[in-house]
Image: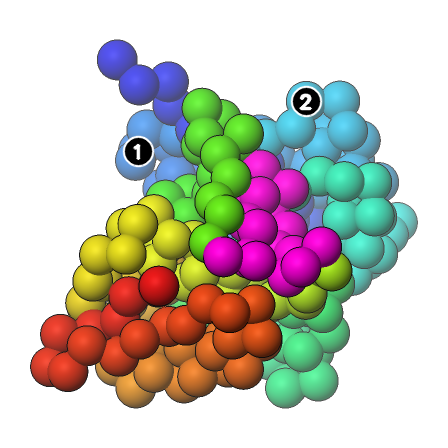
Amino acid sequence: MTEAHRLLLVEDNANLAFGLQTSLEVEGYHVAVAETGPAGLDAIRNDPPDLVVLDLMLPGLNGYEVLRTVRREGFDMPVLVLTAKGEEVDKVQGFRLGADDYVVKPVGVLEFLARVAALLRRATPRQTRDVVFDVADLHIDVGRRSVTVSGHEIELSPMEFDLLVALARREGGVATRAELHKEVWGYRPDIESRTVDTHVAKLRSKIDAAGTRIVTVRKRGYRLE
């Protein structure tokens, strides 16, 4: 039997934390709760979970600082920011600091659970953390989540990296837009089909210098050659 995922919920609203914890545990997750920023950071350092649900407005240490510290110290588990701060500048700051998803309160329970499940699907399984792909001068290290072109590291967004890995795993085979949509974004009601095309275009601009190409296969999808 597959071991249940361990989640950490960093939330100072006791009623909300209880409701989310209950919903997650009904889904089969093991859930720990921290009510302050320092307590959340200690929990991550002492027993890193598989995923963190992080509020931004926390006592002791705000969520931005928790996120900044977690990434600086090398923890790479998915972090879902769940907050009432819904301005674009807040979202951009969250993603820049390393958030994998950003959800504005209030959010429906079903959507919240679906986003958690999608992030866990995208997270690198322990048994594949040593996987690397070499395509021409392109080197992809899945465990380190790094990409180099002719030995020079290039910067990809989390979505771009996941998209590239999804293509590389097929070893030249075609990935349909629907497959990429599911593998990279999971369940996202706000994601439209053209989002895949937009991200592919951005990814192309960064890796084509490696002598590799993302080829559009008419009426089917994309492949990496």
- For marks 2 and 1, the one nearer the N-term is 1
| Image: magenta residue range | 136-151
Depth order, front residue of 200/97:
200
What is the three-letter code of the residue carrying label 1? Answer: Val
On the image, which quarter does residue 14 sit in? top right
Residue 129, percent from left and from top: 53, 31
Identity of the residue drawn at 30% across and 35% down: 27
- Dot 1 surroundings within 10 Å: few (below 14), some, or many (20 or more)? few
Q: Is residue 66 magenta?
A: no
Depth order, front residue of 40/1:
1
Q: Residue furthest top?
A: 1
State the CA–CA distance, disc 2 to disc 1.
22 Å
Question: Circle 2 — which element?
Answer: loop
Residue 203, percent from left and from top: 50, 75
Q: Which residue is mark 2?
A: 47
On the image, which quarter does residue 85 sit in? bottom right
Identity of the residue drawn at 56% across and 68% down: 210
Depth order, front residue of 199/111:
199
Q: Which residue is mark 1?
A: 26
What is the three-letter code of the residue carrying label 2? Answer: Asp
Q: Is residue 149 magenta?
A: yes
Assign the C terminus to one quadrant of the image. Answer: bottom left
Q: Is residue 66 visible?
A: no
From the viewer's perspective, tell me whether residue 121 is left or right of residue 40.
left
**Image vertical order of residue 42 relative to residue 178, above or below:** above
**Image vertical order of residue 48 relative to residue 123, above or below:** above
Residue 151, percent from left and from top: 71, 55
Residue 174, percent from left and from top: 20, 62
- Depth-wise, is mark 2 or mark 1 nearer the camera? 2
